[in-house]
Image: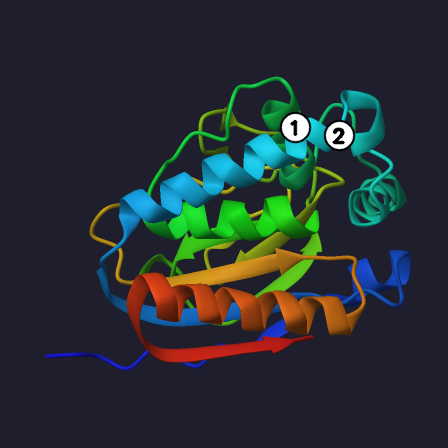
């Protein structure tokens, strides 16, 4: 029996808007029936990384307008972006060093591909692991967060997404609790601004097109807050 993708209420907390009043974010939910071109997605990701490595250096990455804005958001919230780099910056640095990004899983690879193309840090989450509505806010001291591949991470002063169970995603690293695994069929993608709404809408539309090309998506919903 197929269950409908739940409708989420997505918001940005006043505490975060007080630091960045013009902040916007994008979100995307979909049910994925089948991934039919996993190898092709991995090839596209490798090609995008190689092309980026040919035109970028470690010195130019942080100057990318979207990455620079994300780093400024970190500083506005009280976090050092050179210690807790945004994911898009991490991806580009790995590409320039010839280290990837390595394929993880088709859904995650599509998100990483969109991130490489735009400079936007993005999270791919298992929608069924999320409870209640979600809001983007600022991490608090001693707030628990188990990051993928990093273990317990200090999210104090870091922009983070929360549901009824607590923080589950950030522009630096997603959480173990909501990570995409092989059984995942319903996905939530979050685009961590700051970015103008037009860029967020364009990125979401392109992501929807990629899902349509490489998978069999059902019940796609997306929007900008």
Q: Residue tagged by mark 2?
A: 56
**8 relative to 106 in the view: left or right:** right
Q: Quadrant of residue 198?
A: bottom right
Q: x, y (%) of residue 11? A: 65, 72
All told, the count of numbered labels is: 2
Dot 2: element: loop
Q: What residue did someone put label 1 on? A: 53
Image coords of residue 135 (percent x, y): 62, 65
Q: Which class describes the residues within 10 Å of circle 2: few (<14), some (14-19), or many (20+)? A: some
Q: Is residue 22 left or right of residue 188?
A: right
Residue at coordinates 41% horizontally, 47% vertically from top-left? 108
Q: Is residue 142 above or below residue 72?
A: above
Kindly identify the residue that appears in the image at 46 percent across and 70 percent down: 209
Quarter holding the N terminus is: bottom left
Q: Quadrant of the C terminus?
A: bottom right
Crowdedness near tag 1: few (<14), some (14–19) or many (≥20) residues, C-alpha within 10 Å: some
């Amino acid at each position: 029996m197929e269950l409908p993708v739940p409708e989420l209420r997505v918001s940005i907390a006043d505490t975060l808007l007080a630091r960045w009043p013009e902040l916007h974010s994008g979100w995307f939910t979909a049910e994925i029936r089948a991934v039919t071109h996993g190898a092709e997605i991995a090839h596209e990701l490798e090609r995008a990384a190689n092309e980026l490595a040919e035109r970028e250096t470690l010195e130019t990455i942080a100057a990318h307008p979207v990455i620079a804005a994300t780093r400024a958001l970190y500083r506005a919230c009280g976090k050092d972006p050179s210690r807790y780099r945004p994911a898009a910056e991490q991806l580009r640095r790995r590409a320039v060093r010839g280290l990837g990004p390595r394929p993880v899983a088709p859904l995650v690879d599509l998100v990483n591909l969109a991130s490489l193309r735009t400079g936007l840090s993005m999270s791919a989450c298992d929608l069924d692991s999320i409870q209640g509505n979600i809001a983007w806010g600022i991490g608090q001291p001693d707030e628990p967060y188990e990051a993928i591949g990093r273990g317990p991470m200090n999210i104090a002063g870091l922009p983070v997404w929360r549901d009824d169970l607590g923080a589950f995603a950030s522009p630096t690293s997603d959480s173990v609790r909501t990570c995409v695994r092989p059984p995942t069929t319903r996905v939530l993608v979050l685009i961590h601004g700051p970015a103008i709404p037009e860029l967020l809408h364009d990125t979401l539309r392109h992501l929807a097109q990629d899902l349509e090309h490489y998978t069999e998506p059902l019940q796609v919903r997306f929007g900008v807050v």
